Image (cartoon, rainbow, N blue to C red):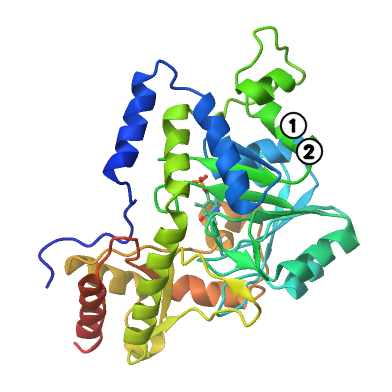
Amino acid sequence: MRETFLPFSKPSIEEWEISEVAKVLRSGWITTGPKNAEFEKAFCAYTGAKYAIPLTSETAVMQVLFRALDLKPGDEVITPSMTWVSLPNIVSLYGAKPVFVDCDRDTLMVTPEAIEAAITPNTKAIVPVHFAGGVLELDRIRAIAEKHGVVLIEDAAHALGAEFKGERIGKHGNVMFSFHPIKNITTGEGGMFATDDAALADRVRSLKFHGLGVDAYDRQTMGRAPQAQVVEPGFKFNMPDMQAVLGVTQLTRVDRMNAERGRLARLYRARLADIPELIPLAQPAYDYKDSYHLFVVRLDIEKVGITRDDFMAELKKRNIGTGLHFRCVHGQKYYREACPVPAGALPNTEWNSERIFSLPFFPGMSDADVDDVIDTCKEILTR
Ligand SMILES: *Cc1c(COP(=O)(O)O)cnc(C)c1O
């Protein structure tokens, strides 16, 4: 058994990055300022986005965006149930209804067909998730959104550095990113809204900071003219510079970190080939580049005869940490009552929700760590 605990995730922060944060702390300006401007610029350069606006989390992006889109009671937002709770929660807080759609059994991503079947006259937006590092079939999903005149918002919490048909995620459309510590880059906590819609970008920029007017002065200096006035009531979700500076440093390393994640993923796949009880995700057949955000497996509970939760507990006893991405949203206490889904309507989501967990996976993890995980899984399975 391992002597030390192997966490399922760990942020990668180098000493020079800590020095950059310290410089901001000593600079006399620690809230939103020049480092935010730098982060925006670097993010646009990296993804190809026209506009990129940092906020305190991706959940905050959702909160602001749905105000900007005037989401109202009676409106519907199409979302996978196999996702983190942020989106359904924020939609619910606006009094609108999350409409859960099923995912593909093996990529865990919603299909264009499932999205189109869920569209009604009340549909306000479609918010699919690029899952675990895989990428949605964007061209077909964009065509559906356009055909029905609904807004498409990509949840790219897992997808920084990923590409669809040679185009980086974030370059086009309305795309939300997260910089929570487990994501491909981190600012401690943080999020980004990337868009090519100038009017929407201005609205989000204003709403993230009290709803104060945004003018040329704001854009250049990232401060506000002291004379700025409230043009509509807004939120307070601006990212402090002491965090934005980490975004700048991490962006210079994201390709290297993702490549390292890719190497670990290939190692896992090779080692898992002789463990049929642990089923990795399938990779989509269309042209895309993976961001290797998570390494998700499904436990063949029928064959093994123990639950996923027990399997995770057995791993933990042996010093191996795991994650759970995700427990289906429609099965959780609030949503079972507030947005009941007919039994059997989301079979792939429910099948995965019972069997899924995430193996330790982060840049800096060694081949020996991967071997420990695999050997420990084998040991539990042959007990
Ligand atoms: C992490 C995550 C979020 C939320 O991001 P925060 O920055 O923590 O608000 C949203 N959606 C998905 C799919 C995520 O994994």
Dot 2, how many residues are within 10 Å of its Cα: few (below 14), some (14-19), or many (20+)? few
Please tell me whether mark 2 sits on a helix, a strand or a loop.
helix
Task: Decide if residue 76 is on the left or right side of residue 102.
Answer: right
Residue at point 52% right, 77% down?
351
Q: How many marks?
A: 2
- Amino acid type, label 2: Ala
Residue placed under numbered mark 1 in the picture: 202
Task: Decide if residue 291 is on the left or right side of residue 268.
Answer: right
| Label 2, label 1: how far apart the Cα atoms are | 6 Å
Does residue 113 lie above or below 9 as drawn? below
Q: Does the residue at mark 2 contact the one at mark 1 (Cβ under 8 Å)?
A: yes
Q: Position of residue 49 (x, y in %)?
A: 67, 48
Residue placed under numbered mark 2 in the picture: 198
Task: Decide if residue 306 is on the left or right side of residue 150.
Answer: left
Does residue 306 lie above or below 180 as drawn? below
Does residue 61 lie above or below 356 as drawn? above
In which quadrant of the rendered image does the N terminus lie?
A: bottom left
Residue at point 78% right, 42% down?
73
The answer to whether residue 149 of the structure is visible from this angle is yes
Does residue 163 lie above or below 207 as drawn? below
